[in-house]
Image (tube, coloured by chain):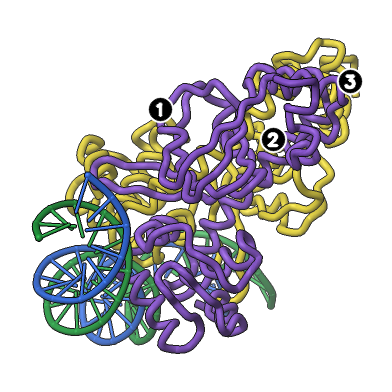
Chain colours: A purple, B yellow, C green, D blue
Amino acid sequence: MGENGHFCSCKECVVRNLIFEHVSVDELADYCSSKTERTVRKGEKIVSEGDPISSFLYIKSGLLKLHRHTADPSYDQIISIAKPFDLISILSVFSDTKYNLSITAIENSVVCEFDLEKIKNLVRTNGEFALDMLARISRTTDKIIRKYNDINIKNLRGRIAYILLLFADDIYQSPIYELPISRKEIAELIGMSTENVIRILSEFRREHIIKINGKEIEIVDKDILKLICLHG
Amino acid sequence: MGENGHFCSCKECVVRNLIFEHVSVDELADYCSSKTERTVRKGEKIVSEGDPISSFLYIKSGLLKLHRHTADPSYDQIISIAKPFDLISILSVFSDTKYNLSITAIENSVVCEFDLEKIKNLVRTNGEFALDMLARISRTTDKIIRKYNDINIKNLRGRIAYILLLFADDIYQSPIYELPISRKEIAELIGMSTENVIRILSEFRREHIIKINGKEIEIVDKDILKLICLHG
DNA sequence: CGCGGCTTTGATGTTCATCAAGTAAAGTGG
DNA sequence: CCACTTTACTTGATGAACATCAAAGCCGCG
C-alpha cells in the first residue's frame, strides 16, 4: 500500500482531526493500514438492515441516508442524513452485531472502512479516544432525537420550511442547492405524504419564498421561511 | 461513611453488575465513596433544561421521564421513560456541559449520583468500561429512536395500544398496573391530544380489551391489543 | 417507442385537534 | 376537617388539517 502514511491518506484526511485527535502518529499508521475506501454511486445501498457489522464506517465525501423499513404497510422512514466525516455506523457498532438500519447513498460518495476490532481496541487502550467517541455518539443521537422533537410540533408548512433550511444551512451552506432526495424521500424524512410535500413546495413557489427548477431549490426569502419554520 | 464497601452499597447495587462489570473491587471502592443517593418524590424535577452537568446519574428505583419543553406554543414532549438502572444522564453527559432536556420523577424514586470527573476518568483508564459505556449509550438511544419510528407509522389506536403494552411488558412486567403518568403525559409521549388519549382508552374499555379504574389499567385481551398495535 | 417511476394538481373523505361544558379528584388554606 | 380552588378527567360537537384516490404530464431508460 505504498510507503507508510503516504498512500494511506489518513494524515490529510479530515477525519483524523476529528476522531484521531488523540491518537499518536505511530498508532495512526497501524490503523491506517486497516483502512479501505469504497466509492459508491447515488442510489447504492451500503448497509442493509440485518447485515452483520464487521467494520467501522465513516463518510469521506458525498451524502447518505440512514433509514428503516417496515413491512406491513410497506413503508420507509429516513432517520437522518449523514454528511462528510459523520461516523455513520456509530449508532449500532458498539451495541450490536447486526445493523438495525439501512444506509444508502443519496449522492455519489466515498465511504471509509476501518477494521472494527482495531477501533474497539483503540477505545480500550486510548482513553481520550474513548471519550471522543462517547462525545461523538452523543452528539449524533442528540441531533436525531431533536429532529423528531422539532418535527413533531410543526404543521406541514413548518416541516417543509425546516427541511429546506436544513439543506441550506446544515448540509450545503448555500441558499441554492440541488435536492439530493426525491419528494417521496422528503416525505419519509419528515413524516407526511408525498403529495403534500409537492403541494407545499408549490405553495412556497407561488408565494415567492423559493424558486424551484426540478431538484434545484433557491431560497429567496429566508426570513419568512424561518418564521414559517418556527411558528408552523 | 461507614467502613469501606459496607455503608457504600455498591457491592449489592445491581448497577455494579451493569456498568462496573469490568471495574476491580479496588477501583470500585474509590468510586463508591464519591456516590450519593437522592430520594425524590413523584413530580419532583431532578434536572432542568440548561442546568450545568456536574454528575453522572442513574436511577436505582422508581420511574422518571426525560422530557423537553418548547415555549412558543407551550408544549412538553416526553422523550422516554427511564426505569431502574438506566443511566439517565447518558444522553448529554459526554457531549455537553449543560443538559438539553429535563428529568422529572413520575414515581417516588432513588437516584444515584457519581462524580462525573471520576466516571470520565474511569473511561480513560479502563478500556472495557469505556466499551460498556459505548454499548450502553448506543442501546439507550436506539430504543428512543425506534420509539419514534414505531409511533410515527401508527394511528391513534395503535399508539395507545403500543403504550399500554410498553407499560405491561417493558416496565411493569404485569398485565395489571397503575399508570404512573396522566392522560396528558401519555399524549406528550406519543404525540396526540389529551382528549383523544381518553377517548381511545374509553373505546378499548367499551370493547372489553382493557379495564380502567382511574389510573389502574388491566389488559384483558392482550392478543387483540397486539393486533391493534401492529396494524394500527 | 413504450414502460415505469417521479412529479404535479384537483377532488374527496377520514382522521384527528380543538372547542365547549361538565364531572370527578386532588390539593390548599382557613 | 371542611369549603374553596385548581387540576385532571370525560364526552360530545365541530371544523381543520391532512391522507388518499384519481388522472395526467414528464423524464429517463432499456
Residue at the image position 50 percent from the left and 44 percent from the top: B145
Cα–Cα gap, marks 1 and 3 = 41 Å
Asked if B89 appears above or below B72 in the picture, the reply is above
Q: Can residue B46 be seen?
A: yes
Residue B30: give its label.
3
A95 displayed left or right of A154 = right
- Residue identifier under label 1: A50
Residue at the image position 23 percent from the left and 56 percent from the top: B203
* Amino acid tagged 2: Tyr
| Closer to the camera in the image, A170 or A140 | A170
Q: Position of residue A54 (x, y in %)?
A: 54, 21
The chain letter for the residue carrying disc 3 is B
Image quadrant in which you'd find residue B220: top left
Cα–Cα gap, marks 1 and 2 = 31 Å
Image quadrant in which you'd find residue B110: top right
Q: Can residue B61 be seen?
A: no
Disc 3 or 2, which lies upstream in sequence?
A: 3
